[in-house]
């Protein structure tokens, strides 16, 4: 599927031109040297691994964040946005990765959010309703009740709504940041049609994604980001999956990252008749000692949820997680006693304790074990910490430094060490390498390999197909809020996983 | 310059400097200020705020605030006088007060955390109930008198085992050591900082927010009760109004000491310095003829300035 | 559970029902309540509380921990200024005094808004600071209560054409809020209060909206201060402070979500009226002032827990 050919002439200025843009957040260099040009009437895709700088790029174009260096030109003129309002005024409409809706307000109000002045309605009531209804129909094929509170709408409709919000602005440049995660295939195709129609009329689109099939379907050219640098820009015809993977990871092909064969053990944990949400199909699964089990699935299809349930921090809609002898594990305490450790997904909000030191961030989950007579003995803490930090290769200045002084990768290592100090039998990791550099990823994979070899059951939820292929013995693919298929080692391949993600047989 | 400011926030030099400077001003403007006697008197005054502010400090580390402290102080104060006057031995009074304050604090902490209600309002409501209950109990006319030894305990001229240090200061010192060790060297203390830093992360790190809040608010109430009992030694008969200033003076001590009301930063050592600074300011103002009006206004401005210097929330853009 | 769904959709419904229940109970207790003479007297007394509750509402609606502890002292400030500043300066005539005081009220509110939105202090801390500054200012301006008040204010304490005089002051805030409801502002305020990140990403000027919200609160508080002045016909520096807690109770009873983004002005009005009726009811039942204090605190706690419970029901989920 080829997108409409770009049809601007040499003299129309590009919509957006970014040159040499750099941005650092404390110690983390999110962008180093980013160069990008989007011309009117074209779809420009940006692809990159987690942590390559995609979100920061979007934030700069939207004015949420100001670059440290480099230039940004909109329609040929230099631009410095103070915030989303100015970006909007310049004709840039952004749909962020997070679905930003106001649950207490109606769908109609959400769609027109920000378009009115503080004390004056800018769009007459009749036009509001008509255009809103028309665009929701264009995107979803349905006519949802515009007066309904968004709290009552499902995730797919909400995501369509935030995209619709951007389109209603009639922008010059539309930025879609991983905006298709919660859309089912039908709606996604309708979205692409809606986009193509407008592109033909001159709209420029910046399309951030990690899905190669979408790039093939929609884009005219692709820029690959790696570690904050735009390493290459290719016309879509040259952007084969292999070439893009090579550019994204800097490696020619995905090397198998782990050594072991993942056999062994008896079942250490199992789920029976589990329903992720009310009404979803139930499933069962057993997790064996010494294996690395991958959990894959499109955003919103259940893999994340399942990780949390397996980790003991979310109750399923029905069914239970059980120990091998059949006893139910009712709450987090029971899971811990059974030897389950869970590494949460959102490092910033659920992982680190930002104001606290590296030392405190490590010790917190096991802190009770280091006390004698009520008082913590530093000797005991060090005895637990030193070997773990060494094995993981945590790079730090002093233990008393705040954890925010570490890079994202090292922070993740500290959190991993924290949970490993529990000496778990089952380690559940929820998207652990998000925003982590390649070297750290390899360190972490090495650790997981060692753990599996030592008999620990490792369950890893990942949003990167390459990671699942490189690291796992078998992969459980989730689709439509249930377990779709478990792909055994012998059949592990990109095609098999991608098919499973879309609910198709390989 | 910025670097200097940032590092100043993390150390206690600003607080130490303030103590010295204020002391200097006192020497210059108030006669008789520099005597050992007057220093002890100031420290004794500071100790009342200081002990109650221990609770406020711990609650602040969680990111909360406790406005029921004056209510509990008043309760302990009046109960000490009334019950002793009715013939109760002191240990019984003390036991009852510990149990009551633990219960009140536990209620505050539990309701705030389990129902996700701002503790400011929960504790304000609880304080109101306590004050009303005291009024009902005493009919507005408190009676009784505190045990005699209590007067000697809190008098600035008092001695401890022959040393010229008032017993209450010795108590404060011991109390301070206990609280600081509790916060820095026990599992509970580490969990307090964790819960204050990030409740979601604390949950995943196996620290229970509800349990920590319940326990911490309970301890805060106990600290307030101790202050209330000590105050009974100051003014023999119980008086409900004696507690009112402690509402804002405990918060001010915490804030001036540099503990963040947002949570997870600071500690009791800082609050001790803050209590001393506050007492110096109050003494200076009173001695120079400025009354409650100036004190309140100054307190308000100090709180705003100090929190603005270190306790600013992240902007919307930073949270996006 | 149709009632539950109705309540979840509009929290003011619960407040309205509570008000009706209390009204019926009051009438049954003593039908004299329906007599014109009593009614006008009662309503006059209730007016400052009602307007005060309206004043604290925009701040709470604006979200991110929105709160305004300075409403009470601001009411007192207006009250004090009438007698201490405006009368001596010959500015006591209504067409001079009213605009001046409203402007001052709005300005104070806007300062709160600036502290919250630009300096980015927690709203509780910011308004605690202004609470103290205003209390100090009140005491400094007027150490002891003083009268009389300007004629026109005194006249308004009596009924005009059968309508209780102070009701005039309700018209101001009610009209302003009604007019704002016909612009996008209310919706924008609820958006900012619901999730300021979403509002920000959509290009809404979050800081501006918050400053306006707090300014509006100050404006309404000025109206409340005027009503209070006409009621007590004197000026007293301490008269405002008790309202601080009462208006928050009223708003909580009225279903205003303390998390922001949810609630209607009607809820605050019903909440305030309910609180007033409760106080009235208890007094008539011979309940002592002391027990009323207890009842008041318990009502606040019950209202908060109920509020949190309904919010949970509405969102249908429990969890971090």
Image: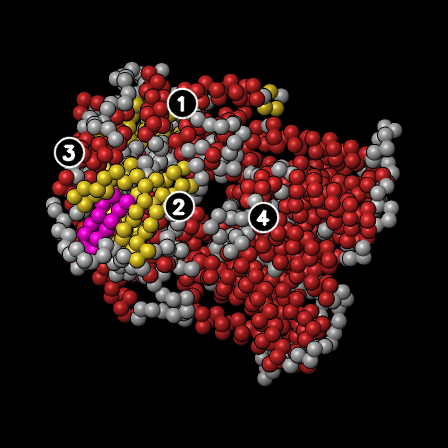
Report the front residue among C253 and C218: C218
Select label 3 or label 1 by which is in front: 1
Determine the residue positioned at 72% across, 51% down. B245
Determine the residue positioned at 48% across, 21% down. A385
Give the left or right position of residue A182, taking residue B47 as reference: left
In 3D space, how far apart are the residues under numbered discs 3 and 1 (Cα atoms)?
A: 38 Å
Determine the residue positioned at 58% across, 79% down. C163
In 3D space, how far apart are the residues under numbered discs 2 and 4 (Cα atoms)?
A: 25 Å
The residue sitting at the front extreme is: A11
Q: Which mark is residue A392?
A: 1
Report the residue marked by disc 3: A505
Share a chain, discs 3 and 1?
A: yes
Report the residue marked by disc 2: A68
In 3D space, how far apart are the residues under numbered discs 2 and 1 (Cα atoms)?
A: 32 Å
Q: Is residue C27 above or below residue A3?
A: below
Select label 4 or label 3 by which is in front: 4
Q: Secondary structure at mark 2?
A: loop
């Amino acid at each position: 599927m080829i997108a409409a050919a770009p049809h601007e002439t040499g003299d129309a200025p590009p919509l957006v031109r970014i040159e040499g843009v750099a941005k650092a957040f404390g110690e983390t260099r999110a962008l180093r040297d980013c160069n990008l040009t989007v011309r009117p009437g074209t779809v420009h895709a940006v692809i990159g691994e987690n942590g390559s700088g995609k979100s920061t790029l979007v934030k700069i174009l939207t004015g949420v964040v100001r670059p440290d260096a480099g230039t940004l030109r909109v329609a040929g003129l230099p631009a410095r946005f103070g915030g989303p309002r100015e970006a909007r005024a310049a004709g840039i409409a952004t749909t962020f990765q997070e679905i930003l809706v106001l649950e207490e307000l109606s769908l109609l109000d959400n769609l027109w959010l920000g378009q009115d002045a503080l004390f004056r309605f800018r769009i007459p009531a009749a036009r509001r309703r008509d255009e809103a209804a028309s665009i929701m129909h264009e995107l979803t094929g349905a006519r949802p009740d515009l007066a309904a509170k968004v709290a009552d709408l499902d995730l797919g409709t909400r995501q369509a709504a935030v995209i619709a919000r951007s389109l209603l602005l009639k922008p010059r440049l539309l930025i879609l940041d991983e905006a298709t995660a919660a859309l089912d295939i039908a709606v996604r195709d309708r979205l692409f049609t809606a986009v193509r129609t407008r592109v033909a009329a001159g709209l420029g689109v910046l399309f951030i994604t990690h899905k190669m099939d979408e790039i093939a379907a929609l884009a005219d050219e692709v820029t690959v980001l790696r570690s904050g640098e735009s390493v290459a820009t290719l016309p879509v015809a040259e952007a084969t999956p292999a070439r893009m993977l090579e550019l994204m990871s800097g490696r020619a092909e995905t090397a198998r990252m782990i050594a072991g064969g993942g056999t062994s053990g008896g079942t250490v944990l199992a789920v029976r008749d589990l329903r992720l949400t009310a009404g979803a199909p139930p499933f069962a699964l057993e997790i064996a000692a010494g294996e690395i089990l991958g959990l894959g699935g499109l955003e919103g299809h259940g893999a994340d949820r399942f990780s949390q349930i397996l980790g003991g921090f979310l109750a399923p809609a029905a069914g239970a997680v059980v120990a091998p002898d059949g006893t139910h594990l009712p709450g987090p305490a029971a899971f811990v006693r059974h030897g389950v450790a869970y590494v949460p997904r959102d490092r910033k909000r659920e992982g680190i304790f930002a104001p606290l030191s590296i030392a405190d961030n490590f010790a917190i989950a096991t802190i009770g074990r280091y006390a004698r007579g009520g008082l913590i003995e530093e000797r005991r803490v060090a005895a637990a910490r030193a070997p773990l930090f060494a094995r993981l290769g945590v790079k730090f200045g002093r233990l008393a430094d705040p954890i925010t002084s570490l890079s994202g990768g090292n922070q993740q290592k500290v959190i991993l060490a924290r949970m490993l100090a529990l000496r778990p039998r089952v380690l559940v990791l929820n998207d652990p390498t998000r925003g982590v550099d390649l070297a750290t990823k390899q360190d972490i994979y090495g650790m997981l390999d060692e753990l599996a070899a030592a008999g620990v059951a490792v369950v890893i939820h990942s949003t990167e197909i390459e990671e699942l292929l490189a690291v796992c013995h078998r992969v459980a693919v989730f689709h439509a809020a249930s377990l779709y298929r478990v792909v055994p080692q012998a059949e592990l391949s990109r095609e098999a996983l991608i098919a499973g993600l879309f609910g198709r047989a390989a | 310059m910025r670097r200097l400011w940032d590092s100043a926030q993390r150390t206690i030099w600003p607080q130490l400097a303030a103590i010295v400077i204020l002391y200097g001003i006192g020497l210059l403007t108030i006669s008789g200020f520099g005597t050992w006697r007057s220093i002890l008197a100031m420290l004794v005054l500071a100790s009342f705020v200081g002990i109650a502010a221990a609770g406020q400090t711990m609650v602040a580390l969680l990111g909360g605030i406790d406005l029921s402290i004056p209510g509990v102080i008043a309760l302990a104060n009046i109960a000490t006088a009334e019950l002793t006057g009715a013939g109760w031995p002191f240990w019984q009074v003390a036991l009852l007060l510990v149990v009551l304050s633990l219960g009140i604090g536990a209620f505050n902490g539990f309701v705030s955390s389990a129902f996700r209600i701002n503790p400011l309002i929960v504790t304000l409501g609880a304080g109101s109930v306590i004050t009303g209950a005291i009024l009902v109990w005493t009919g507005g006319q408190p009676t009784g008198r505190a045990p005699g030894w209590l007067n000697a305990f809190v008098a600035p001229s008092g001695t401890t085992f022959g040393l010229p240090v008032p017993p209450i200061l010795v108590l404060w010192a011991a109390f301070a050591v206990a609280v600081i060790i509790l916060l820095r060297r026990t599992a509970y203390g580490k969990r307090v900082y964790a819960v204050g830093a990030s409740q979601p992360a604390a949950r995943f790190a196996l620290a229970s927010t509800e349990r920590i809040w319940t326990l911490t608010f309970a301890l805060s109430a106990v600290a307030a009760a101790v202050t209330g009992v000590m105050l009974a030694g100051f003014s023999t008969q119980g008086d409900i109004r004696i507690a009112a200033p402690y509402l804002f003076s405990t918060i001010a001590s915490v804030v001036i000491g540099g503990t963040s009301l947002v949570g997870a930063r600071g500690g009791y050592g800082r609050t001790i310095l803050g209590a001393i600074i506050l007492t110096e300011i109050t003494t200076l103002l009173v001695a120079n003829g400025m009354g409650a009006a100036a004190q309140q206004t100054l307190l308000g401005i100090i709180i705003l300035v100090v929190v603005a210097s270190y306790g600013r929330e992240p902007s919307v853009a930073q949270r996006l | 559970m149709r009632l539950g769904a109705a309540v979840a959709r509009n929290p003011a419904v619960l407040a309205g029902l509570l008000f009706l229940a209390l009204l019926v109970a009051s009438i049954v207790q003593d039908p004299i309540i329906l007599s014109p003479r009593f009614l006008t007297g009662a309503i006059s007394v209730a007016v400052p509380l009602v307007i005060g509750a309206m004043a604290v509402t925009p701040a709470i609606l604006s979200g991110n921990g929105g709160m305004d502890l300075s409403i009470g002292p601001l009411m007192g400030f207006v009250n004090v200024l009438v007698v201490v500043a405006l009368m001596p300066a010959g500015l006591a005539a209504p067409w001079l005094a009213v605009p001046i005081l409203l402007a001052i009220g709005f300005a104070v509110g806007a300062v709160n808004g600036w502290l919250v939105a630009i300096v980015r202090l927690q709203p509780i801390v910011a308004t605690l600071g202004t609470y103290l500054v205003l209390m100090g200012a009140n005491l400094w301006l007027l150490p002891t209560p003083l009268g009389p008040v300007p004629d026109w204010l005194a006249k308004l304490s009596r009924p005009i054409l059968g309508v209780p005089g102070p009701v005039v002051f309700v018209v101001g805030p009610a009209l302003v809020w009604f007019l704002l409801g016909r612009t996008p502002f209310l919706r924008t305020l609820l958006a900012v209060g619901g999730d300021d990140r979403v509002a920000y990403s959509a290009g809404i000027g979050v800081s501006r909206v918050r400053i306006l919200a707090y300014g509006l609160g100050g404006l309404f508080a000025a109206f409340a201060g005027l009503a209070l002045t006409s009621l007590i016909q004197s000026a007293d520096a301490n008269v405002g402070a008790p309202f601080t807690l009462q208006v928050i109770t009223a708003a909580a009873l009225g279903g205003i979500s303390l998390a922001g983004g949810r609630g209607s002005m009607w809820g605050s009005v019903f909440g305030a009226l309910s609180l007033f009726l409760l106080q009235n009811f208890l007094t008539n039942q011979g309940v002592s002032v002391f027990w009323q204090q207890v009842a008041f605190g318990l009502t606040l706690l019950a209202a908060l827990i109920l509020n949190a419970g309904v919010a949970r029901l509405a969102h249908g989920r429990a969890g971090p």
